[in-house]
Amino acid sequence: MESEILPQAGAVAATSARIAGAADIDTLVACAAEARTLAVALHQDEAGAALVTGVLSRFNDAIVVRALDLLAARFRLPPTRWCWLGLGSEGRLEQTLTTDQDNGLVFSASDDGEARQLRELFLPFARAANEALAECGFPRCDGEVMAGNPRWCLSLSEWLESFTGWVRTPEPEALLNAAIFFDFRPLAGAGELTVELRRALAELTRGNEIFLRMMTVNALAAQPPLGRLRDFVTAAESGGTIDVKKFGSRIFVDAARIMALGAGLAATGTAPRLRAVAAQGIITAADAEAAVHAFHALQGIRLAVQGATSLEAGTAGNQIDPDRLNEFDRRVLLEALRQARALQQRLKTRFHIDT
């Protein structure tokens, strides 16, 4: 989180305490709703997007940890090390008000046979956790990227094998998996298991021109909706709106990930990654800060949209109509998208891509 005084610090602490002390899943469901309402209030109090998403992500971390603690008491888990992985936006500490589940589980096993046996013991626990988190307001992932899926409940050796395969054979599905799983972060359990994962990933991706170029080509499929004759380009089928996640904040997420992986850096958050690559001299500090500010501006727009729609209609999204913005917010959106275009141009130049 950015250096910023936290509004409603007492309420944040009280909610955190209630989450940690929840006696059952039903209580945790109520705490999760309280946490989202408080996050909306923080944003309405003009707390910065980095602070709000950081607080919300920490709330969500605490909800996951408490749910796992409650469920672990109901299941006979095997006596081996295991760790629950937060992936995607959860791994980056960048969750907004609408977020589905992206998680996995890694455990220690001596060989393939033991891994198969342990997986069968962990899966009921993981599936119960996925169900509990869905009750807490985190929808199940449409792509089944969840620890209750046998594909993502793996031994350390199996995870290492998967990572190696994705990097060495960067086919479309592998690139999609990389964009989700390579932002992993330990949430509960034996976090030391992820140290080896992160070290191995750095060795695989550092300076790997073929893989990084393929990731870049994939990322460039989403272009900032900027026009030559008018400020924004919107599609009729989207009702004249812009998806500020897909065509905005995700551009910064993807670019930061590519540069960080190429440098073998351990950071997972977008802002930390941008600043880390600047410290390596890959981009200038000024360019990194410009990108960070633009990314946070887009995150702030997403929070505003989601806060309004979730409170009014029980739903939340990322669509915004630029014609309904005031002049100041319109200019903020325009400049943020220009920064996104500049970051993509840097990647095109770096990997000699002409699009």
Image: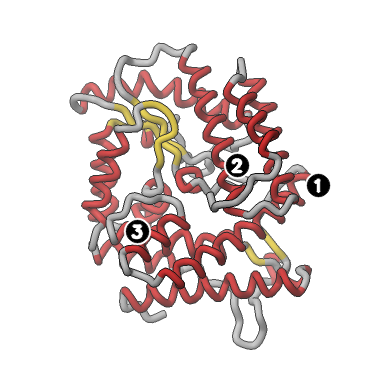
Tag of residue 166: none
Between the C-alphas of marks 2 and 3, the distance is 24 Å
Q: Position of residue 306 (x, y in %)?
A: 70, 51
Q: Foreground: 298 or 286?
A: 286
Q: Of the residues tagged 3 and 1, which is closer to the observer? A: 3
Tag of residue 56: 2
What is the secondary structure assignment of the residue under circle 1?
helix
Q: Residue at x 49, y 12 (%)?
A: 74
Q: In the image, what residue type sits under mark 3?
A: Ala
What is the secondary structure assignment of the residue under circle 2?
helix
Q: Residues within 10 Å of mark 2 (few under 14, many from 20)?
A: many
Between the C-alphas of marks 3 and 1, the distance is 39 Å
Picture quadrant of residue 189: top left
Picture quadrant of residue 25: top right
Q: Residue at x 78, y 68 (%)?
A: 324
Q: In the image, what residue type sits under mark 2?
A: Leu
Which residue matches tag 1? 312
Between the C-alphas of marks 1 and 2, the distance is 20 Å
